[in-house]
Image (cartoon, rainbow, N blue to C red):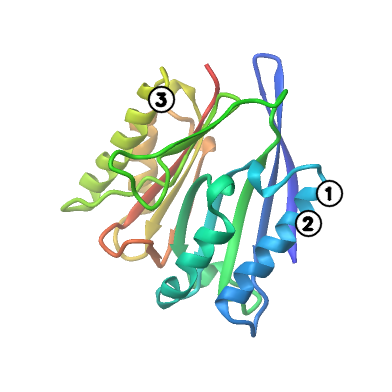
Amino acid sequence: MIESAPLSWLHNGRTTELWRLSGEGQAGLAPLEQLAGLVDDCAALLAGQELTLENLVHQRLWLRERSMRAEIDEPRRILLGDARRAASSSFISTARFAKGGDVALDLLAQRPVDHGIRRLIDFAPPRRYAWYLLQDGWQHFSGMAETAANLPMQFDAACDEIERGLIAEGRDWAAVTGAHLFLELGTGDEAWLRQAFAKRSGLAPSRIDFDWVDGLASTDKHLEIEAVARPI
């Protein structure tokens, strides 16, 4: 079952409509079948709102176990790639699953304004995931996670990538309207990460979400930061 909810973002008198979708795969099915079922169900719900998977601006994949990545990565690229590709993140977390599934999706779709401009920006050199996506001026960052010798250095490196992306689009932290922090269990302290990010970004604590995870996509990275910035 997919949970869905409408969102409305207002900036400079213009309302942007979004739909947030979240679902867990059907228990008892293979991970690939769970992913395909979730994608089909999300597509059907979006169609009811005159949207498609090509309107996605963020994809977040959850797996119960890291060992499933080898089976999921290529199907995910096929099912949610090409024109459906968006800012993205992925995590390992047993706590995310409440119904016996092994695969879960959190998707965010944004309704274009007057056939608005969509632009996906990759890293140079490219990574498996995009750097950020621009839709009608809203800047959606993939989860930024970087390799470094320790957690504070990983934090600084992740923030550096967000700052580089903001600067590339003529923005700074003042344009950021919300962020989601993820920290691997056993590697650090939630209060430290929240305080460090609030100090670095200037973002109000009420606009900073946080979740513990069992692991990130890469085993040598232990924290990840998603962010959204408003149009300029």
- Specify whether 33 is left or right of 122: right
Work out how far the residue at label 1 is from the one at label 3, CA to CA, in angstroms: 36 Å
Question: Sequence-wise, which precedes: disc 1 or disc 3?
Answer: 1
Residue 215 in view of the camera: yes
Residue 58 in view of the camera: no
- Amino acid type of the residue that numbered disc 2 sits on in the rendered structure: Ala
Front residue (pair 2, 47):
47
Q: Which residue is mark 3?
A: 173
Relative image position of residue 152 (x, y in whole percent): 23, 46
Front residue (pair 123, 5):
123
Residue 201 figure quarter: top left
Tell me if label 2 and label 3 are in contact, CB under 8 Å: no
Q: Which residue is mark 2?
A: 44
Question: Sequence-wise, which precedes: disc 2 or disc 3?
Answer: 2
The numbered disc on residue 48 is: 1
Front residue (pair 19, 124):
124
Tell me if label 2 and label 1 are in contact, CB under 8 Å: yes
In the figure, 134 relative to 149: above or below? above
